[in-house]
Amino acid sequence: MTLKPTSLQSIMSKNSLVRLLLVLLLGLLAGCDDNRSTYSIATGGTAGLYYPYGGGMASIWSARLNNINVKAEVTGGSVINVIQVARKESEMGIAMADVVTSAYVGGGRFPEPLPLRVLFTAYPNIVHILSLAESEFDSVASLGGKRVALGAAGSGTAVAATNVLTSLGVDDIAPVYLNFAETTSALKDGTIDAGFVVGGLGIAAVTELSVTRNLKLIPLTTDELVKLHQDHPAYSRTDIPASTYNGVDSDVQALGIWSVVVVHEDMPNDVARSLTCTIYAHRESLLKISAVAKSMTVDNIRKLSAVPLHNGTLAYLEDTDMACESGL
């Protein structure tokens, strides 16, 4: 693919701004005790779900564990997050399963395996392939030769978008690297033809686009989803239910990719256990941020089988009734 750079002004919606201010306020309130250690969780951009979701987890940990404050860090997304965790620049990071798998085994963007472990599974992401209703695009193949936003450089969205296009043989697009807010803005302005946004159902950037424009979600066929799963075992079929977004009145067949929280393999077991236990004990707080938190269950904790769970997480699973504060 030949990169054709596009410079667009990022637009933050009112909803995104409110969520950002709430997360910042919670972080400030949690940071009042100077005697506590400071941890960070690498998340994503403010227009996506990783940042408010990571901010929600940070607030739970800071409020419930006596010896740490946790701050949510704005980043470029999954690829940067796993690198920061591997370098011990962040204690935790949210990342998509395909990126974590590549990082753990070494491949693609990761020439050497990274020392990562899964702390727990967060929620399933949906690959949204966006265009406008008046466009001619009704399949991935129809995007050949068109201007397509692949997500921010270094993000899990960019990895997933590239994997989808490569697996399905669409290699002649004009790629543009934009974050979620920039992607939806560019669609409105007509400076791109389509764009990829990967996140939980009801993601704010897509919701807001569907209110201001007639949204089209480009579906994947069953054969395409089978091919994608064969090429990338972390991928699975899912659906975007009708009425999730304004004007989308029927189910749309789509690609699903789980997000997980990763830590360095050297994190002490008691710390990892405390972090995991505390999130599961107070999961209802995350439901106030997004309904996707309903997927954060113990039953789903092993969704990414290609990468080991941290030993501290395994200790939690052996005795889920033990107090959460041991180690922190």
Image (cartoon, rainbow, N blue to C red):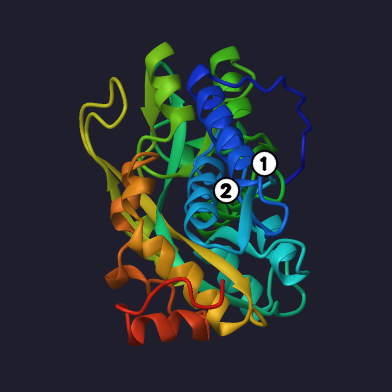
Instruction: Give the structural element (helix, strand or loop) at label 2.
Output: helix
Occupied quadrant, residue 6: top right
| Residue type, mark 2 in image | Thr
Does the image show residue 46?
no
Tell me residue 237's x, y (percent).
32, 57
Q: Quadrant of the C terminus?
A: bottom right
- Is residue 223 shown above or below 306? above
- Residue at 39% x, 20% y is 210
| Residue closest to the eye, 31 or 45 | 31
Percent across and percent down for residue 227 are 41, 64
Any part of residue 251 in sight: yes
Placement of 159 over or under 106, stated as above or below: above
**Disc 1 from disc 2: Cα separation:** 7 Å
Kindly identify which residue carries mark 2: 157
The x and y percentages for residue 145 are 62, 35
Please give the name of the residue rendered at 67% of the width and 82% of the height, measured from the top-left corner. 266
Q: Are marks 1 and 2 in contact (CB under 8 Å)?
A: yes
| Residue on which disc 1 sits | 152
